[in-house]
Image (cartoon, rainbow, N blue to C red):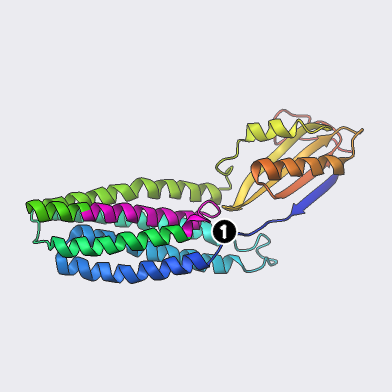
């Protein structure tokens, strides 16, 4: 029986785009809060509330990245990478509460809409659109490498939709005087947040439960693994993610005695890395097929 380990986990999370996005978002959030109070626009205030979650999300993501860089120790042998996933889960819960509050407040104000200064509402939302666009461009390069970055990117992207919605509402109110449109747009923003928050929350929970990462089909993985010459059987196969861009795999692999297990493992590692982006692998080498049909089986090994 033998084992092979590959611990080449690479980190590509970048802090600078997050820092700049945080500065831009926080600065404009203050402007939007003041503008919402002055103009009396709930849509503007709801967008500002959404930006509060953006600021919180970016700040927590940045903090989590700092923590995740701490080296592994005797208590946490995988290091502190899971902080990023915990941050993503926390941010989605925050989003849920904000969205529900926005919808509730919109219904309350729908029956007695206050006077709204549509011109100021238009100007502030227009500035917000520019800020969101710049922040989105800053985060775009790394959005598929981390749930934190992805969450922040989606936050900013939805803020762009919110800003566009507020601009449309201000134009309608200016042209018609229909103040109730402000509440309708606020509800739209709230309903826009909820499904996105749910998707990100499910992804975070899947990582915390050590589920198979999104984009990896275990049947396809096994099919490609069995094409490696010398592999007779694979069992006790587990695939999970420590954090969004650090996928791990362990497996017991039965290898034909005519083949060198080191060569077989090397070929298998190349397939896992190139086709599934799995860089952290641990293989247990065996010479006898598994006695039972399921993965939790007993075996005889030489």
Q: Quadrant location of the N terminus?
A: top right
- Residue 152 versus residue 138: which sits nearer the camera? 138
Magenta residues: mostly which secondary structure? helix
Q: Is residue 288 above or below residue 155?
A: above
Which residue is identified by label 1?
Answer: 82
Residue range in magenta is 139-167
As for residue 142 lying within the magenta part, the answer is yes
**In the drawing, does residue 61 fall left or right of residue 113?**
right
Total labels: the figure holds 1
- Above or below, 218 against 143 in this view is above
Q: Residue at x 59, y 42 (%)?
A: 212
Q: Is residue 266 visible?
A: yes
Q: Position of residue 120 (x, y in %)?
A: 17, 65
Q: Quadrant of residue 156?
A: bottom left
Q: Split into 4 quadrants, where in the image is the C terminus?
A: top right
Near mark 1 (Cα within 10 A), the count class, few <14, some 14-19 or many ≥20, is: many
Q: Residue furthest top?
A: 293
Q: Position of residue 240 (x, y in %)?
A: 62, 47
Lateral position of residue 59 relative to residue 295, left or right: left
Across and down, in percent, residue 22 comes to: 42, 68
- Where in the figure is residue 11, as x and y percent of width and height? 63, 59
Q: Is residue 49 in view?
A: no
Q: Secondary structure at mark 1?
A: helix
Q: In the image, what residue occupies the spot 72% across and 28% down?
A: 293
Q: Residue 272's image quarter?
A: top right
Give yes or no for residue 221 being in the magenta stretch: no
Residue at 78% over, 29% down: 291
């Amino acid at each position: 029986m033998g084992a092979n380990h590959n611990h080449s986990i690479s980190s590509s999370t970048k802090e600078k785009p997050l820092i700049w996005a945080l500065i831009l978002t926080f600065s404009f959030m203050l402007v939007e809060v003041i503008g919402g109070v002055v103009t009396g626009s709930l849509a503007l205030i709801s967008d500002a509330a959404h930006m509060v979650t953006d600021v919180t999300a970016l700040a927590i993501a940045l903090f989590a990245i700092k923590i995740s860089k701490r080296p592994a120790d005797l208590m946490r042998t995988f290091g502190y990478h899971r902080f990023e996933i915990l941050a993503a889960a926390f941010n989605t819960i925050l989003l849920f509460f904000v969205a529900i509050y926005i919808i509730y407040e919109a219904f309350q104000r729908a029956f007695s809409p206050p006077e709204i200064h549509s011109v100021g509402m238009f100007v502030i939302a227009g500035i917000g659109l520019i800020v969101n666009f710049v922040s989105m461009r800053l985060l775009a390069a790394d959005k598929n490498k981390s749930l934190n970055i992805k969450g922040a990117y989606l936050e900013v992207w939805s803020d762009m939709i919110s800003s566009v919605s507020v601009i449309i509402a201000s134009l309608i109110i200016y042209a018609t005087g229909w103040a109730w449109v402000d509440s309708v747009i606020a509800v739209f923003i709230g309903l826009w947040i909820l499904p996105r928050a749910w998707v990100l929350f499910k992804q975070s929970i899947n990582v915390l439960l050590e589920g198979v990462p999104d984009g990896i089909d275990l049947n396809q993985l096994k099919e490609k693994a069995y094409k490696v010459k010398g592999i007779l059987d694979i069992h006790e196969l587990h695939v999970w993610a420590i954090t969004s861009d650090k996928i791990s795999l362990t497996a017991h692999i039965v290898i034909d005695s005519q083949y060198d297990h080191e060569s077989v493992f090397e070929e298998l590692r190349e397939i896992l890395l190139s086709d599934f982006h799995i860089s952290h692998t641990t293989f247990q080498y065996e010479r006898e097929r598994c006695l039972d049909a399921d993965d939790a089986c007993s075996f005889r090994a030489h």
